[in-house]
Image (cartoon, grey):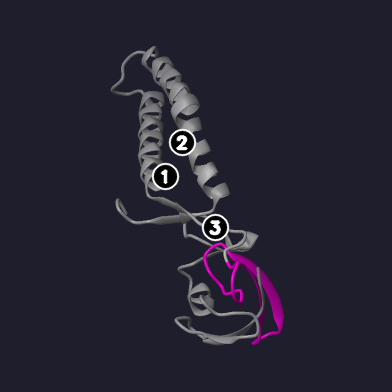
Amino acid sequence: MADEKNYVTQAGYDALVAEQNDLVHNVRAQVIVELQEARAQGDLSENADYDAAREHQAQVEARIRELEVLIKNAVIIEEEGANKQGPKVVKLGAKVKLLDLSDNTEHTFNIVGSIEADPLNGKLSNNTPLAEAIMDKQAGDVVRVNRVDEPYDVKILEVR
């Protein structure tokens, strides 16, 4: 993960930076207060509050380090205008409207990096079988989605 590129939208990048800033400037200070209050209770060998505060501190520091790596290796994907010339094809950052031909339902997804993936909110990771199947295709194409238990076909209705 240390040298892996992390594809994110500008909004996703901004959220990572904001989370890191909050952890460094706010949460760390809260953890220090928790530790001080727990130490003030006396014997640390049998102090559950102290153990909990130390565990919280470890989690915060681990997340800060993780965010540093994610931010360092972030590659911001262009969302708007990614397909300025020629036919619009599915790329990272594209918004895609699909018709699932197995049940005739329509779905709209933004193709994002795995860090931002949230399929319930319309953000589909570029590493999913569906996204991999539709990459570099254009509106009107019918694509077979493999690498799933039951392969199925989708029709690309629109690419923005």
Residue at the front extreme, as displayed: 85
Q: Earlier in the sequence, mark 3 or mark 2?
A: 2
Mark 2 — residue?
20
Height in image: 146 above or below 112? below
Look at the numbered discs 1 and 2 and tell me whether their residues touch, using CB distance below 8 Å.
Answer: yes
Mark 3 — residue?
78
Locate the C terminus by quadrant: bottom right
> Could you say which is closer to the camera, residue 78 or residue 105?
78
> Mark 1: which secondary structure?
helix
Residue 107: within the magenta? yes
**Extent of the magenta region:** 83-110
Determine which of the numbered discs, if any, sits on residue 22 in the image: none
Type of the residue with mark 1:
Ile
Quadrant assignment, res 102: bottom right
Type of the residue with mark 2:
Gln
Residue 155: within the magenta? no
**Residue 157 x/y as whole percent:** 68, 79
